[in-house]
Image (cartoon, grey):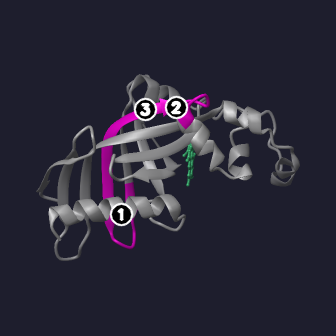
Amino acid sequence: MSLEDIDISAWTALETAASDPQSGFRYLNLCTVDTAGNPQARMVVLRRVDRLARILEFHTDTRSPKWQEIAAHPRVTVVGYGHQQKLQLRLEGTIKQYTFESQQASAAWRGLSARTRSTYAGGPPGDSLAFHAAADDASTQPLDDAEGLAHFGVLILHVNTLDWFQLSRENNQRAWLTYTDSGALHASKWINP
Ligand SMILES: Cc1cc2nc3c(=O)[nH]c(=O)nc-3n(C[C@H](O)[C@H](O)[C@H](O)COP(=O)(O)O)c2cc1C
């Protein structure tokens, strides 16, 4: 496979994952630096990919710690593993944040199911629970769409580098690709795994 093919296939895998819940890259690990300078990581759902602009989109609650962390340190790393392809993708770039008043958040909100929207209507993520409601109780509570929207945030990651690593019994392979701000492939090379 050529470096150009690697670029194409990696972004095809990401694009597929944004619409296929079974795909290996559907859930990615979003890594940030917190306000104390410590590393933080958590799983997020890959919601949208723009392969030409080299954009990955994630959704989160604007009250969550990660939202504040990214506001202070917008450079992040995202890592995922596709079990079937035995492929690790590590992407680095800068996140832009969009709150509910933005066009980006409105468009994303329109595409969400009522069930997903309702996850933004609860208490602030990470706050202590006063009581642990049974799952059955929670599902019977009315959903407040407007309240959920007020906490809804879109994270748009503009990818600058891709570290591509394929596991193989005989010969692990690794490639390093960089992109310009407009999303063009800037440079690519094979590196030692
Ligand atoms: C499979 C999986 C997918 C998740 N997807 C998201 C997501 O898309 N957005 C999100 O904010 N949290 C998501 N979470 C929860 C986060 O991993 C995390 O626990 C939560 O957002 C709090 O993160 P923070 O305290 O670093 O802000 C997901 C958790 C799992 C297990």
**Mark 1 closeness class: few <14, some 14–19, many ≥20 residues within 10 Å:** few
Label 1 SS: helix
Q: Is residue 98 left or right of residue 119?
A: left
Estimate the spatial distance between the alpha carbons at disc 2 and disc 3, rounded to whole Å: 7 Å
Is 81 one of the magenta-colored residues? Answer: yes
Nearest the eye: 63 or 134: 63
Residue beneath the point at 55% across and 34% down: 103
Residue that numbered label 3 is attached to: 96
Query: Which contiguous range is marked in magenta?
Result: 80-103
Residue that numbered label 1 is attached to: 12
Q: Name the outermost residue toward the bottom.
A: 170
Nearest the eye: 157 or 170: 157
The residue type indicated by label 3 comes to Lys
Give the answer, above or below, for where 37 lies relative to 104. above
Percent x, y of residue 135: 80, 53
The residue type indicated by label 2 comes to Tyr
Residue that numbered label 2 is attached to: 98
Give the answer, above or below, for where 75 lies relative to 3. above
